[in-house]
Image (cartoon, rainbow, N blue to C red):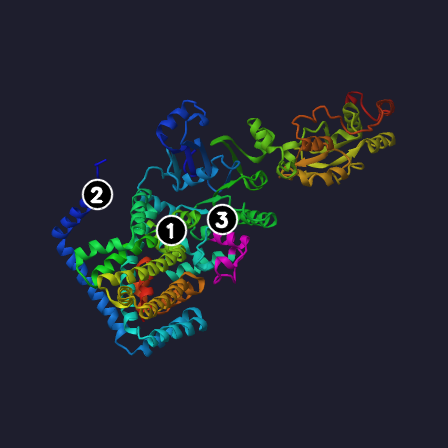
Amino acid sequence: MDVRIPFGSWVESGLDWIEHNLEWLFDLLAAVYVALYDAVVWVVGTPPAIVVITVLALLALAVRGWRFGLGTALGLLFIVGVDQWDNAMETLALVVVAAFLAIVVAVPLGIWAARSDRVSAVIKPVMDFLQTMPAFVYLIPAIGLFGIGVAPGIFATVLFALAPGVRLTELGIRGVDREVVEAGQAFGSTPGRILRQIQLPLAMPSIMAGVNQVIMLSLSMVVIAGMVGAGGLGGDVTKSLSALDTALGFEAGLSVVILAIILDRFTGAFGTKRGLHLFRRLRARGTSDAAATAASSPGASSPTADREAVAA
Amino acid sequence: MNDHTTALRADGLYKVFGRHADEAVIRLHQGTPRDQLGHGTTAAVIDASFEVRRGEIFVVMGLSGSGKSTLIRMLNGLHEATAGTVEIGGERITGIAPKRLREIRRQRVSMVFQHFALLPHRTVLDNVAYGLEIQGVARPERDARAREVTQIVGLAGWEDKLPGQLSGGMQQRVGLARALAADTDVLLMDEAFSALDPLIRREMQEQLLELQATLGKTIVFITHDLNEAMFLGDRIAVMRDGRIVQVGTPEEILTDPANEYVEQFVQDVDRTRVLTAESVMRKPRAVVHPAAGAHGALQAMRDEQLSAVYVTQRDRTLVGWVSDRDALDAVRRGERSLDGIVRPDHGAVAHDTPLAELFIPALEAQLPLGVTDSRGRLVGVVPRVTLLATLGGEPGADAQASPRPDPLPAAVVDRALEAAVDSGALDAEEAI
């Protein structure tokens, strides 16, 4: 039995080829990642912690009510209390950027898959692959392509978090009542218009559930990305692991949990009626401001709104 | 058939789902039964041809799986026909560019859906205005028109509600209003009232007929409910296993079913609401003209063994009736004229009265119920036995039915007539 499939070396040489021939592309991607990351870190890291906490707590109040507002404030104050604030803001920035990029890719892919059975058949195994491949494995080529730092962390996170966004978008659009879509067709609506006026609005709860999942997966991956020098809470978790520092490990770990809960409740709220209602009101109100958002496809506007909600 | 009267024409329509669709059409055309097409090939509609006249309600009726929903979706191109053509207002809509098809849908044909298919995130008014929005009508105008139509269907005051806040019947009114607001000539209604409960359904059917009377749309209505089909349809196409097995007026379908399937299907229908006096009436056994006089009337009744007879003018305009006893008395008194004994309370009904409304008049009438046309002429009579036989559903069951009872014994009449001849009150020739 000395037959061995040299699969590993095929992948390796493939990546080598990419590294040599598409270096410019990855340099560009890295530059974009870093720029986005720096911008978000600047927004959430520059003001004093108390200002950021107040703003987030008020936002939480508006989205879900006083209980969530209070919880958000207390949780964030705890993070400040264990001296993890800066790390938490770095992690938040990583999550926001990675989730944003993942959604920008995932939603259009999901729409495409919903409209074509062939595309769906191709995308499905790819998504299975991306989602079930052990998360660490992404980090290896990521270092090769991007070096150490924020960029490989974001790259690996986007790959890992993509799948639920694509799946739930496809599911949501395919799940829209066939008769309602037929009504659009029967009155002579164009396919683009049906997508914009019927399919996306009706699929919104499912798409928002996908967005929520993307964010949660991003958060878990971002911590792992601490291993490749992405910094933030992940950095401290990795450090505590190698130093067997239980205290630091739990402080950083609990901070991750708090961030996760806050992000989950925020994005979850947009999938509910109340959240959608608020979302629509916001869109309707700021006509001048939201004109670009509202006029462009809601698919593109949902991640924007999310980013606003989280980053504000 | 020219295009002024034909709003919609389907010619040799086939819809086959699955593999080898074109091949399947050829095989079906050659007579292969649809269950022998092989796995993965389903023939939903087979060789459907019909014409819908402008302003008529054309009902396509069949059980689920008979292909009627597929058929209606081919009429506006939601399903592409595998073979055959569809014309709306003289323009072919099969095999044309998607852009042109969308234009035709905007201008010519709109649709009402079984489960309403409203946009749940839009208000009633915005839903009603949807077709106009797609047509590119500016906001103020489409709102105004949508408001108008919303009022017509009886939903004034609900404009700003969301569909979810409305009952099923109201939601379907919105669906109907949306189709009406688009102001197309042709309206396709796919099981439009099937999801509503019976009382609301009846109400909607009546409203549809009212709207149809005022707006004069051409309507293709799909249903699995025979009573609904009979109530709404000017003509009905009965579908079975993808084929149209009969096209005809409700009465034709009921009284002259094309095959056993249709016959079984129509067994349960409430005939008394579909059939009219005209369709069950018989030729009157005898009528007399006023000029015949009392003797003539009495003689006619004796010959036909009748106890009473209708009196009509020469142009068959109904005047009234006389009974044999009155005529006998008159003859005995020596009166020649009928004037004194003709009773005007003939109780005749119009020719288009449904059977359901004939029972009471038939009971009250002294002789087989008279049926008059729009100009008041006696065109037939409906004996009670005929009425009962029709309910039994056996065509021709009343043929051997016997006439009403108790005419005067012929001997009594003969004696009276003879006495009259003897006394010179009547000429012998006249008595024949």
**Residue at mark 2: chain:** A
CA gap between label 1 and label 3 equals: 19 Å
Q: Residue at x 12, y 51 (%)?
A: A21
Q: Is residue A67 magenta?
A: no
Which of the chains bears the disc numbered 1? A
Left or right, B432 with respect to A158, comes to: right
Q: CA distance from mark 2 to mark 3?
A: 54 Å
Secondary-structure class at tag 3: loop
Please state if B67 lies on the left or on the right of B303 as rendered.
Answer: left
Q: Are marks 1 and 2 in contact (CB under 8 Å)?
A: no
Residue occupied by mark 2: A7
Q: Nearer the viewer, residue A18 or B417?
A: A18
Q: Position of residue A223 (x, y in %)?
A: 29, 63
Which segment is the magenta one? Answer: B152-177
| Disc marking residue B62 | none
**Residue beneath disc 3:** B115
**1 or 2: tag closer to the N-terminus:** 2
